[in-house]
Image (cartoon, rainbow, N blue to C red):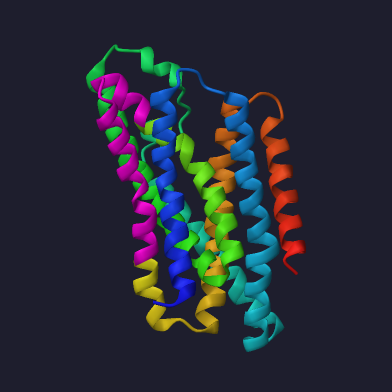
Amino acid sequence: MSTAALYGLLFSLFAGLATGVGSLVALLTRTTNRKFISFALGLSAGVMLYISFVEMLADSRVGLVELFGEQQGTTYMAVAMFGGLLLAMIIDRLVPDVENPHELHSLEELSDKNNHHRLQRMGVITALAIAVHNFPEGIATFMSGYESWETGLAVALAVAIHNIPEGVAVSVPIYAATGSRRKAFWYSFASGLAEPVGALVGFALLMPIMSEVTMSVVMAAVAGIMIYISLDELLPAAREYGENHIEMYGLIVGMAVMALSLILMM
């Protein structure tokens, strides 16, 4: 295994295990810092959007234009990006709205002991839904790390921030229903393992056919996946948790931090 592939796998593992961190937050505290979560989710979206539009799509277009010319290369980049958007949209549609993993949950729900069966069912289905959502995120994190460890680290941190409240979403109903911290933690932890599994599938499928063309197309598709995650999941969830424009402040800070880091790495 190459060093680049190893970086990708490690970054995806790190991002996936953040759901376990969210579970620990739910089990060790009793109040929700909504403003902080809103800001953090906005920051995560800012990092993903900036990397997607400024780094990944730009690099993909340069590579494809060099190989196929201005018009054809730009067309391939656009098709790949919208393909990534479509893939993320299809996966999102597979999850019923009533059990969407990005539905707002708070730690105060731990005190609600009514209707245990419904709460446990919600926690289990939410864990499965998060696993489905985490699969393409694992591929995205892996490919970002494969491109460069700097980009991979930034994407992994953004996805990890995104995964923390998802860990809360699994832990809250499971613990409220069963009273078992261990069961709540392991359901959350297991749902995050879909992230490195997605990375391994990406590695198995893409490495045998990896070339400059493949890399450029995949980068554009990954950018599309991250754009969808940011606009459909992160920002709406941030607005639900926050007040007024807190998620927008996080978005701007995330973009600024990412811009500064890319400038300093030049």
Q: Residue at x 44, y 71 (%)?
A: 5
What is the x, y in percent for residue 140? 49, 61
Residue 181 drawn above or below residue 127: above
Residue 40 drawn above or below residue 94: above
Please say whether residue 197 is one of the residues in the magenta stretch: yes
Q: Please give the count of numbered marks on the rendered protein.
A: 0
What is the x, y in percent for residue 76? 59, 76
User: Is 219 or 95 nearer to us in this picture?
Assistant: 219
Q: Is residue 57 left or right of residue 87?
A: right
- Specify the quadrant of the image occupied by residue 9: bottom left
Indicate the quadrant containing the C terminus: top left, top right, bottom left or bottom right: bottom right
- Specify the quadrant of the image occupied by residue 247: top right
What is the x, y in percent for residue 34? 58, 24
Q: Is residue 139 left or right of residue 263?
A: left
Main SS, magenta region, reads helix
Q: Residue at x 53, y 76 (%)?
A: 215
Q: Residue at x 47, y 58 (%)?
A: 11
Is residue 87 in view from this perspective?
Answer: no
Q: Is residue 131 left or right of residue 58?
A: left
User: Is 264 or 84 nearer to us in this picture?
Assistant: 264
What is the x, y in percent for residue 35? 63, 26
Please say whether residue 23 is one of the residues in the magenta stretch: no
Is residue 44 in view from this perspective?
Answer: yes
Q: Which stretch appears magenta? A: 171-200
Q: Residue at x 67, y 65 (%)?
A: 55
Indicate the quadrant containing the N terminus: top left, top right, bottom left or bottom right: bottom left
